[in-house]
Image (cartoon, helix red, strand yellow):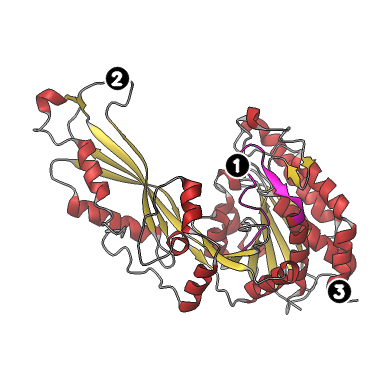
Amino acid sequence: MSDAKKALEYVRANRKRYLSELQEFLTIPSISTLKENKGDVQRAAEWVAAQLRSFGMDKVQVMPTAAGGHPVVYGEWMGAGKSAPTIMIYGHYDVQPVDPIELWSSDPFKAEVRGDYLFGRGSSDMKGQVMASLKAVEAIVRTTGLPVNIKWLVEGEEEIGSEHLGDFIKKNKKLLACDFCLNPDAGMMGADKPTITTGLRGLAYFELKVYGPSKDLHSGLFGGTIHNPAQALIELVAGMHDKNGKITLPGYYDKVRKLSKKEREDFKRLPVKDSELKKITGVPALWGEPQFIPAERVGARPTLEVNGLLSGFTGQGSKTVLPAWAMAKISCRLVPDQTPEEVEKQMRAYLKKNAPKTIKWELITLHNAGAALVETDSAGVRALAEALKTVWGKRPYFKREGGSIGSVVLLQQYIGADSLLTGFGLPDDNVHSPNERMHLPTWYKGIEALTHFFYNFK
């Protein structure tokens, strides 16, 4: 009997216990954003540490983060030797708040099984994914022994932006050194669509303020003489795209990496239809650069979006004012090899060129994150693709996410480790919403796929 088969038999024999332990994990209300749950967050960290110790991981620690932040759980097993790869497994044990509680069909921290689904906050995002990783490694340790070195990094602040993770990684670079990171905080495109996420877009987030008169004015007395800041802001924002959706900031596309023929083929293979996008979003028609399909626009092209506008009187009824100021929140999603710093310079150059003399403006940078991309022919991607194919019987889909995950960029930036993103959550898992759930048949398959993944490095 092969080593992989021995471990898989262990996984299948212990499914009932795996589910019971996941339910126990889900009962801990580790809501990282609420002060009253700080003790529960600590308890969840200790729970993960106990799991690691239970199947022989070494140097298991619940490590504090700066300024009283939530702790990071670390553990390792380095017995495979220097010639074997070292794989870090990332996860987070914190969860989102449960509001509005009245929309839940069951207690969000009771972890109730109904049919093929396990309902509870964190079941999909991402305690279920953490448990899939824990149980795959446990099965290998209990049967044949690990063929690779393993390190664990399980944080408690992902749902609040991984606020202290960057400082933690910088401080512990030597401890966290690895060849690459397995991050199961992504998901699948469907229960029959195994998925590997090979890229994430970066982010440059701005607040643009436009000022006119020193105070709100009577629009009848001063309209037509004083340039309205709201109008000036709208004109500036409108000019940031041309009629085809191309962004007009100077130099914005200079470093945008072109898609290869193979990458474009992978995008075309994704089961994303225009009709489905229109149905999901409720729009009458799609919009964007016509030379790219929607999956490419979301995963591999940079964007500029207005996230909010505020100016003047917005209350009930009418009030004829010419506002003193106007504000827009603007986010730019970035792709390799763009940087937030360069995009800020491009935004300022655009404003200097196009802002009229009749107003003053101020640009504030609120948040930055770099883009991430993993080559599809890397050893980690090949090992995972083969594992998913073995379990699901089909070649996985390769996709790039339109969003950002802080840990991916931080690990690449500070220890030079690329992240391999996967996961077994589904699009209808109600992540961050009432009635969050995990599809158990897919979860069990995920544990088996991760088990194959580690053996694929032999």
> Circle 1 is placed at which residue position?
432
CB-based contact (under 8 Å), mark 1 and mark 2: no
Kind of residue sitting beneath label 1: His
Between residues 173 and 329, which one lies in front from this camera angle?
A: 329
Can you name the residue that lies furthest to the left here? Answer: 225
Q: Residues within 10 Å of mark 3 (few under 14, many from 20)?
A: some
Instruction: Give the main secondary structure of the magenta stretch.
Output: loop
Give above or below for 94 relative to 251.
above
Residue 57 image-quadrant placement: bottom right
> Circle 3 is placed at which residue position?
3
Image point (54%, 65%), residue name: 270
Question: What's the CA distance linking mark 3 and mark 1?
Answer: 38 Å
Residue 287 image-quadrant placement: bottom left
Point out residue 148 in the picture as x, y percentages from the top left corner.
76, 72
Left or right of 400: which side holds 175? Answer: right
Between residues 227 and 62, which one lies in front from this camera angle?
A: 227
Point out residue 451 in the picture as x, y percentages from the top left corner.
78, 66
**Could you tell me if residue 211 is visible in this image?**
no
Q: Find the magenta span and give its range.
A: 421-441
CB-based contact (under 8 Å), mark 2 and mark 3: no
The magenta stretch spans residue 240: no
Residue 315 image-quadrant placement: top left
Image point (71%, 36%), residue name: 29
Instruction: Report helix, strand or loop for mark 2.
Output: loop
* Disc number lying in front (2 or 3): 2
Point out residue 186 in the picture as x, y percentages from the top left corner.
61, 57
> Circle 2 is placed at which residue position?
317
The magenta stretch spans residue 434: yes
Kind of residue sitting beneath label 2: Gly
Give above or below for 34 relative to 253.
above
Label whose residue precedes the other's in the sequence (2 or 3)? 3
Instruction: Report helix, strand or loop for mark 1.
Output: loop
